[in-house]
Image: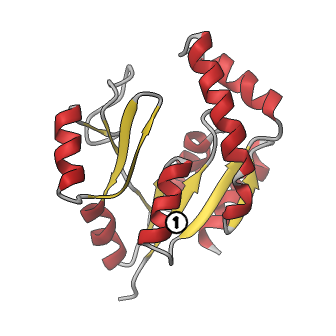
Amino acid sequence: MSIGRVVVLTGPSGVGKGTLLKAILSQHPEAFLSISATTRSPRPGEVDGQHYYFLSREEFQTKIAEQEFLEWAEFAGNLYGTPRSPVIEQVNLGRTVILEIELEGARQVRKTLPSARQVMLLPPSVEELERRIRERATEDEAAIARRLLQAQTEIGAAKEFDRCAINDQLDTAITALEAAIFS
């Protein structure tokens, strides 16, 4: 059996990572999407252990101290991290493991797993990204402003990544992201 690999997928909030990954994973059941842990509260419809592992801040900090995360970071007031053992188990089974994480986490994984492929998903423009974030209608103006400011930093870091894909038209974006992950 061959050893699998880790692919890190990063992009600004609202760029469409979840939508594109859903389409790609339906076409590639051999791939494994890593489930992150977070201290944020579940959104409507989110299930613990399926969408995220929802932890208290104290539980999360204990796991940090025990080095149970491949990476972790604080974002928008909450902690997020990638549990180490499920990723390693799936790689050892020969699967492609996709980590959908933010920029700081991607930078940490670059140090802890330098063989991981790093992919950045970009919006066609900042204006389109703002439209998508506002269309979700899940955040107030202050949160939107924070996300757009963070997006500028993330877009500016695109040159750090092995591959980039632009989420402009859905079919084209799926094809580009699929090539970045599997080729």
Which amino acid is tagged 1? Val
Q: Where 39 falls versus 4 (above or below)?
A: above
Residue 113: x, y in percent? 44, 73
Q: Identify the residue at image location x=67%, y=30%.
A: 149
Q: Where 142 falls versus 125 (above or below)?
A: above
Q: Where 17 falls versus 90 (above or below)?
A: above
Quadrant the C terminus occupies? bottom right
- Residue 50 found in image quarter: top left
- Residue 31 found in image quarter: bottom left
Residue 96: x, y in percent? 46, 70
Q: Residue 179 vs residue 51: left or right?
A: right
Q: Where 175 falls versus 12 (above or below)?
A: below
Q: Residue 35 vs residue 113: left or right?
A: left
Residue 89: x, y in percent? 27, 70
Q: Secondary structure at mark 1?
A: strand
Q: Residue 39 vs residue 106: left or right?
A: left
Q: Nearer the viewer, residue 89 or 144?
A: 144
Direction front: furthest residue: 65
| Residue that badge 1 annotates | 7
Direction top: furthest residue: 140
User: Badge 1: how crowded within 10 Å, few (<14), some, or many (20+)?
Assistant: many
Residue 68: x, y in percent? 23, 58
Q: Residue 46 vs residue 19: left or right?
A: left
